[in-house]
Image: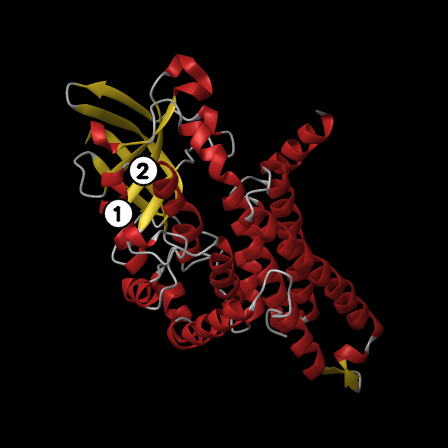
Amino acid sequence: MPIPLDRACQDEDLVIFRDSVRAFLHEHLVPHLDRFEQEREIDRAFWRQCGDAGLLCPTVPAAYGGLGLDFRYNAVVTEELAYAGCFAGPPLQSDIICEYFVAHGSEAQKRRYLPGMVDGSIIAAIAMSEPGAGSDLKAIRTSARRDSDGWVIDGAKTYISAGQQCDVVIVLATTDPGAGARGISLFVVDADTAGFTRGNRLDKIGQHYADTSELFFDGARVPASALLGEEGQGFVQVMQLIAQERLSIAIMAQAGAQRAFDEASAFAADRRAFGQRLIDMQNARFTLARHAASLQVGWAHLDHCIGRHVRGELSGAEASAAKLWHTEMQWQVTDDALQLHGGAGYMNEYAIARLWRDARVQRIYGGTSEILMEIVGREIAR
């Protein structure tokens, strides 16, 4: 079954919007996803098509080219992309990066970057992770120091989505090494900035359509106006927006789990062994029944979280718990779905193989499951 429509956070307008998104992806994404996998990136034509269809950055205000909608519309696009088999690209731009400009950008930054992010002519990246700092952002070593007319950035970033394609990147850097979290700031760096170079396109286990790269800053000089928000507030800004990032990943996880379940159900109904359908065997039925229950609970919980987020009530700990539960559930469902396929599940010609590869990183980026348990545990212990 596709993503359910009769849900608490849905209304008639969202159902109509979902139908248009689903039809768009069926025409413009699904036939090209294998090519995107082979080319190791989602091509710019698809970005522009998404922009033309109004699927990028729906929450951006109309003054900057957006539709000024609430996050439920982002959720619809992210769900349908993940169900179609794409966990990268537009969700990062729409659900995460554009919010940094909306929430913290100057008027000049908003007018320069947001319209292009909405229409797909600008691809943005956000550079936080480093070779020695992933979930622990306070351990970053990339630095930005003042000079006479701006800032000079030095350092290296890794695991950066859209690193090869990006036209602009938001960079997390230390501006006061002795101030800890209060000494971290965000900067907007254009891709043609002298001293900014792209490293290797990283060879990943899955999500091959996602352009993931190393980035280097060697005396990259940016103007004073490149500071995003206030100096020393970078860590705070990230924490303010992390709930939406983790909710977005939870949304992808739920939709990805649903697709894996549907692939396994269809295979089990068609596959015959020992004179009967696989689905007529108790083990297969019980496996699918257990995961059907998880999916039922998952959609209800996801709608609960989306509703709270739209109302401004979703806490960081709640979002962390959501990402933790939904991504762990996605992995369990997807791994069992591959197992039900038997040897066929290990063949790349079957969709479940890609879904399985792509699901693994969901428990890592945006905060590993272990870090999220620590966050939730600290909230319990307060």
Which disc is residue 349 wearing? none
Residue at image location 50% in from the left, 45% down from the top: 245
Residue at the disc numbered 2? 105
In terms of sequence position, does the residue under pointer 1 or pointer 2 come before the other?
A: 2
Of residue 292 and residue 129, the one placed in the foreground of this image is: 292
Query: Label 1 is placed on what type of residue?
Result: Tyr
Give the vertical position of 287 relative to 381 (above or below).
below
Where residue 123 appears, x then y in whole percent? Answer: 30, 52
Q: Quadrant of the N terminus?
A: bottom right
How many other residues sit within 10 Å of disc 1, few (<14), some (14-19) or many (≥20)?
many
- Report helix, strand or loop for mark 1: helix
How many other residues sit within 10 Å of disc 2, few (<14), some (14-19) or many (≥20)?
many
Residue at the disc numbered 1? 113
Q: Quadrant of the C terminus?
A: top right
Q: Is residue 328 left or right of residue 163?
A: right
Of residue 58 and residue 222, the one placed in the foreground of this image is: 58
Q: Is residue 348 left or right of residue 160?
A: right
